[in-house]
Amino acid sequence: MFYRVLIFAVLACVLFKMLVGRWPWQKKDSARQQALLRARRLLGVAADANRNDIIAAHRRLVAMVHPDKGGTNEQVHEANAARDLLLSELPGPEN
């Protein structure tokens, strides 16, 4: 009986992970953390990226999504917002 309950609990946890993307005991990321993660993914930078890394990644992305290159204004605005958000998270007076 105990093993049935244990197996059911394990399967429920695995199903939860597959559906939600996190384990049931993991704390849900805040909206700010989720926005930072999306910005890092969009620009393709690591969590420890410095100011120069962020700016270089932004320039590369904007060069690809600029309306003159077949992109849209919305994509450029999204890239700019991602850059601004990541730069605002950097420590130091240069922000």
Image (cartoon, rainbow, N blue to C red):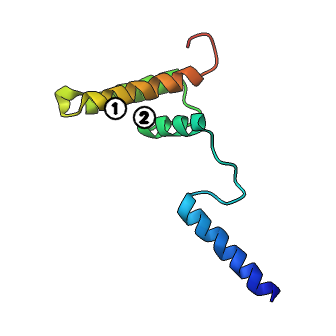
Say if 19 sits above or below 48 in the image.
below
In the structure shown, which secondary structural element does the residue marked by tag 2 occupy? Answer: helix
**Neighbours of disc 1 within 10 Å: few (<14), some (14-19), many (20+):** some
Q: State the image quarter where residue 56 is shown.
A: top left
Residue type for callout 1: Leu
Which residue is rendered at x = 56% and y = 57% of the image? Answer: 21
Which residue is label 1 attached to? 61
Residue at image position (19%, 31%) is: 69
Q: Nearer the viewer, residue 48 or 69?
A: 69
- The reply to whether callout 1 and callout 2 are in contact (CB within 8 Å) is yes
The reply, left or right, for residue 76 in relation to residue 93 is: left
Q: Residue furthest top?
A: 93
| Residue matched to label 2 | 43
Q: CA distance from mark 1 to mark 2?
A: 7 Å
Q: Which mark is residue 5?
A: none
Quadrant in the picture for the N terminus: bottom right
- For this orientation, the residue located farthest to the right is 2
Q: Name the foreground residue: 50 vs 11.
A: 11
> Above or below — where is 78 with respect to 8?
above
Tally of marks: 2
Residue 9 percent location from the top left of the image? 71, 75
In-image side of 33 versus 85 (left or right) = right
Q: Relative to 52, is 71 on the left or the right? A: left
Q: Amino acid at mark 2?
A: Leu
Precedes in sequence: disc 1 or disc 2 = 2
Q: Position of residue 30 (x, y in %)?
A: 62, 39
Residue displayed at 47% across by 26% down: 54
The relative height of residue 59 versus residue 47 in the rendered view (above or below) is above
Q: Position of residue 60 (x, y in %)?
A: 34, 30
Between 35 and 42, which is closer to the camera in this rendering?
A: 35
